[in-house]
Image: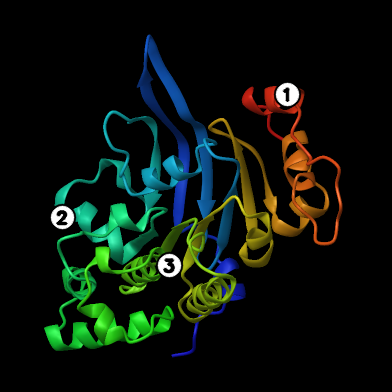
Amino acid sequence: MSAVTAEEALGREEALVRVEELTVRFPVEGGHRTVVDDVSFEVRPGEVLGIVGESGSGKSITSLSLLNLVDDPGEIVSGRVLLDGKDVLKMRGTALQRVRGADIGMIFQEPMRSLNPVFTIGKQLIETIRAHEDVKPADAYDRSVDWLRRVGLPNPERVMRSYPHEMSGGMLQRAMIAVALCCRPRLLIADEPTTALDVTIQAQIIDLLLDLRDETGMAMLFITHDLGVIAEVADSVLVMYGGHVVERGDVFSLFDDPQHPYTDALLKARPMPGQRLDRLPTISDEVRRIAAAGVTA
């Protein structure tokens, strides 16, 4: 069977995941604060959708909502997350566990909080594979070693025997990426997946993710504050501020001709190689007020 190319996957009409009018809030003294406000978007097979915005814009909470992982006291107030026409937000128990890992994988922003400290990396990989596929332990072991090798970890057999606290931050990040990819999910949510990695390993991981996209038609939701990475990997982009989507568009149009003043200011704030500045660019209060009001381009 021939591989599914990115172009073929993007040409399909049906969305893999459709998010409709998602709203999430957290309690604060005297009321609630809405951190994701009426957000809608869709991701098609093979598409890389980038979500950009500064810290606190709602990027990570949006991504956690796709797997119904918003912890108390947070509350998903309204909206739907449709996978194959079924609302993930209404799933419980076994149905939800099947979605997590097999259909939607996630690279979390903080590996120390997402990997279990009392189990070896190998045990966590093997259990993830066997939870979703009927494979023998020996086969799951071999696949786990292969994934650790693919994410660039030296001596993967030794890593299999290691506990999270025995590994550096960069090694943990790569191990977590292996856990997220080992069942070849149809959608990968990558929340700042290369932040803890040096430039060489970062490029290797991005190449691996894009190769998997080309081989399998895997879609990606790529969340980052690094506009350079988004320009390299994304097909389309959502720009978020204060829980709102202020602009969306294909990556070339958005970078070449941003329509929203916040997007324009965000792009102008990027450091440019060889550019000497007396003062770093900032985003004006007026632009922030426009973005916070939920005005979209």
- Residue 227 vs 242, above or below: the answer is below
The residue depicted at 38 percent of the width and 46 percent of the height is 64
User: Which of the 4 quarters of the picture holds residue 232?
Assistant: bottom right
Quarter containing the N terminus: bottom left
Task: Indicate the secondary structure of the residue bearing disc 3.
Answer: helix
- Residue 147, position in %: x, y? 35, 81
Quarter containing the C terminus: top right
Q: Which residue is mark 1?
A: 285
Task: Indicate the secondary structure of the residue bearing disc 1.
Answer: helix
- Residue 192, position in %: x, y? 50, 56
Q: Earlier in the sequence, mark 2 or mark 3?
A: 2
Q: Which residue is mark 3?
A: 170
The mark tally for this picture is 3
**Disc marking residue 94:** 2
Select label 1 or label 3 by which is in front.
3
Select label 1 or label 2 by which is in front.
1
